[in-house]
Every structure is written in C-alpha cells, then in structure tokens.
Image (cartoon, grey):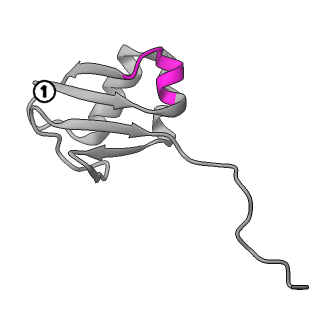
Amino acid sequence: MKVRVLLFARARDLAGRDVVEVELPAGATVAALRERLASELPVLSGFVTRCAVAVDGEYAAEEDVVREGAEVAVIPPVSGGESCKKDSQG
C-alpha cells in the first residue's frame, strides 16, 4: 500500500522535499513506517526516531496501524524559545 508522508521543519530540510510516498505492507505500524523512511531516506535515519508521527491528523503510537491512503506527518521535536516563567522579583 502507498502512504503519503508529509515532512516538516528539519525533516523537510534533511530530505530536501516536503512530501514522500512510501510503500508499506498491509497492516504496517508506525514503527514499520519509521523503518521504511530511514531505509528509503538514509539522511533521516538518525532523526526520524526522535520525531512525533501523526496519522490523519492525530498523534500516533508506535504500535498504531497505518491504513492505506493515510496521510502521515513527521513532526520534529520543538526546542528553543524564551521561558514563560516570570521573574519572581516582579
């Protein structure tokens, strides 16, 4: 089955594109999808394991099954920004 995978932020930069289609066997899990991505796009192999995966707009667990025609998003971890804590002095 074919699955459309959207790549965001650093994943997109590393892959050099924002969408990739991967072929998976029926009943494949999110974990299998990660393995296939790393295999087909070796530049993502060390990075994709740290990313969140969403399937059809919902965050997915490793054991979740990816259905045929699903839209998958690889969402890199977010970091940086300013602290939201206010200074205790006022």
Q: Which residue is mark 1?
A: 25
Which residue is painted at 29% across and 29% down in the image? 5
| Principal secondary structure, stretch drawn in magenta | helix
| Position of residue 20 measured from the top left corner of the image (x, y, whole percent) | 30, 19
Q: Is residue 41 above or below residue 61?
A: above
**SS for tag 1?**
loop
Give residue 6's quadrant in the image: top left
| Position of residue 57 measured from the top left corner of the image (x, y, whole percent) | 25, 49
**Residue in front for this viewpoint, 86 or 57:** 86
Which residue is painted at 29% across and 51% down in the image? 60
Q: Quadrant of the N terminus?
A: top left
Specify whether 47 is left or right of 27.
right
Q: Quadrant of the C terminus?
A: bottom right
Which amino acid does the dot numbered 1 rest on?
A: Pro
Please rate how many residues cluster around mark 1, counting C-alpha atoms within 10 Å: few if below 14, some from 14 to 19, many from 20: few
Which residue is painted at 17% across and 45% down in the image? 65
Stretch of the chain drawn in magenta: 11-18
| Position of residue 82 measured from the top left corner of the image (x, y, whole percent) | 74, 58
| Position of residue 79 measured from the top left corner of the image (x, y, whole percent) | 64, 49
**Residue in front for this viewpoint, 32 or 72:** 72
* Residue 17 on the magenta segment: yes
* Residue 64 on the magenta segment: no
Residue furthest out toward the right:
89
Q: Is residue 8 above or below residue 19?
A: below
Residue furthest out toward the front:
90
Q: Is residue 76 above or below residue 81?
A: above
